[in-house]
Image: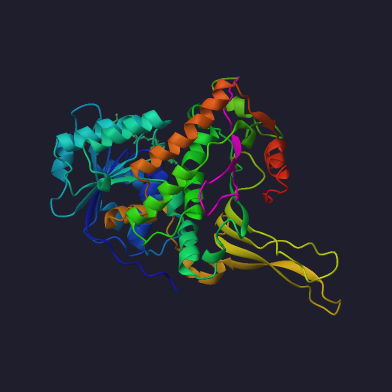
Amino acid sequence: MVAKTIPVDPFDLVIIGGTGDLARRKILPGLFRRMCAGQMPDEARVIGASRSDLDADGFRDFVREALEEFAGETQCGDGAVDQFLAKLDYVSLDVFGDKGWKELKASLRPDVIRAVYFSVGPSLFGEIARKLSGHGITDEHSRIVVEKPFGHDLDSAKVLNAELRACFDEHQIYRIDHYLGKETVQNLMAVRFGNALFEPLWNAQHVDHVQITVAETVSVAGRGGYYDKSGAMRDMVQNHLMQLLCLSAMEPPAKYGADAVRDEKLKVIRALEPVSPAEVVRGQYNAGGDVDSYVAHSEDPNSKTESFIALKVKVANWRWASTPFYLRTGKRLRGRMSEIAIVFKDPPHSIFEGEFKRKGNVLVIRLQPDEGITLRVTIKEPGPGGMRLTEVPLDMSFAEALGDQVSFMPDAYERLIMDVIRGDQTLFMRGDEVEAAWAWVDPIIQAWQDAGDTPVAYDPGGAGPDDSLMLLHKDGRRWREIKP
Ligand code: NAP
């Protein structure tokens, strides 16, 4: 059975940066897949805009190639690509000049939802906002979508927020963190707040600690220049891992709605304790096998940017006092794995004799690979060997449980773009959330900059630096395995 989709209302979606990498790999193929799923109404239109001197047919050729490469399996039949291409238009414009803006305005319809996706670097955001409102292309009903990175520190994030808010109201601004568009991330809320089973145990009394891991096998090759100015803390922790932490730690919102959920996430960020240098491990990968070292792709041979980071984070509130959250993310690790593991405390007393060591239950929310949820439980080992205990996973792989519904599950970008058209901001970051996250991250970065801290080297293909293992060992805990 394929998941039901409800068509959204007719819309004009302008993609500024429509010829860029993100548009080619994610946004345009995602829109195509939504059309195939029946979610895009016949009247929907997509207008690409960038400096490239293309006409509508030239843009359609670009999009045809993008679909061939990136659309993947869809529910579409023959003719669908042409049907999608017929929805496209293109305007050549320069964000910093006057060229093209009048043409863009003339190409848009007055009576449909209007959204503008800023699929360009953040240095263009303020100028695009000014051009859109200055030319009367957007009004109080329009929506804008902005990409990460949203600033590189608190000050720059405040400047970006001020530039956008000078032209748009907060309810019109959709700041993308594509992790929030992942099915399992929303499932985390469904599991927590849709079942009576977990919430009573979801606190310091029963949870020993929480591990959040986003491990990547890829290197920084191809984006070394950009990455070197960012590093794992800014590129991953400030946004993606922070969002996962918030959804794991937040109080139940009064309802599933944009401000109710975001208010609760903001409270978590504001409750984070400052992190001391002893609770942070930064790493940078060496060369190994046929893999270049991190610095081989950086412009600075002495770069001190981290490609790995692990932190012990404390949420100073009633629910989580004494239950640490361990976060880690890195490149060139053994496997590609993103998960949140809620590690429950051991049972207080064992009635069983023997060698079996009592272990707490672990609830794992897997974002990738194989999105799903696993609960590790203790059972009796089968057979007549007496009362011997063992651990097994109660596994719910979405792919197995939901069959075809998963094959055509929208990817994060598809889901989020449709939420923009529906006007649902729940899975988008609010300006105050982004600023609060930077306010927590900045002093951590400042502390290692002040100390001239150098990341420790780690070999590619492993689990990161040994020091990160020690971060848990000294608390009598261990990281979950990163599998190949
Ligand atoms: P990109 O490949 O460099 O594309 C940039 C786009 O902006 C191009 O279409 C470019 O076209 C247009 N552009 C640049 N300057 C312009 C100007 N002055 N006026 C009008 N158009 C202009 O960048 P990208 O990888 O698509 O990334 C876009 C944004 O998404 C960035 O903020 C990035 O951090 C974020 N992001 C990207 C990815 C990804 O996978 N690529 C993932 C997450 C976030 P012309 O040169 O023809 O003008």
Residue found at x 72% / y 35%: 289
Q: Which image quadrant for residue 2?
A: bottom left
Residue closest to the far bottom: 384
* Relative vertical location of residue 225 with respect to residue 145 in this rendering, above or below: above
Residue 326 drawn in magenta: yes
Per the rendered image, the range of residues in magenta is: 302-328
Residue found at x 13% / y 39%: 136
Residue 182 drawn in magenta: no
Expressed as whole percent of the image width and height from the top left, the position of residue 188 reads: 49, 60
Q: Which image quadrant for residue 399?
A: bottom right
Expressed as whole percent of the image width and height from the top left, the position of residue 326 reads: 60, 46
Q: Is residue 291 left or right of residue 428?
A: right
Q: Is residue 76 left or right of residue 480?
A: left
Expressed as whole percent of the image width and height from the top left, the position of residue 376 reads: 66, 64
Instruction: Give the position of the N terminus as an image quadrant.
Output: bottom left
Secondary structure predominantly adopted by residues drawn in magenta: loop
Q: Nearer the viewer, residue 10 or 18?
A: 10
Q: Is residue 353 left or right of residue 105?
A: right
Residue closest to the far front: 318
Q: Is residue 103 left or right of residue 249?
A: left
Q: Nearer the viewer, residue 241 or 246?
A: 246
Q: Nearer the viewer, residue 169 or 369?
A: 169
Question: Can the viewer see residue 50 in this picture?
Answer: no
Q: How many marks?
A: 0
Which image quarter has ligand 1? top left
Q: Nearer the viewer, residue 284 or 414?
A: 284
Expressed as whole percent of the image width and height from the top left, the position of residue 323 reads: 60, 51
Question: Can the viewer see residue 101 in this picture?
Answer: yes
The color scheme shown is: rainbow
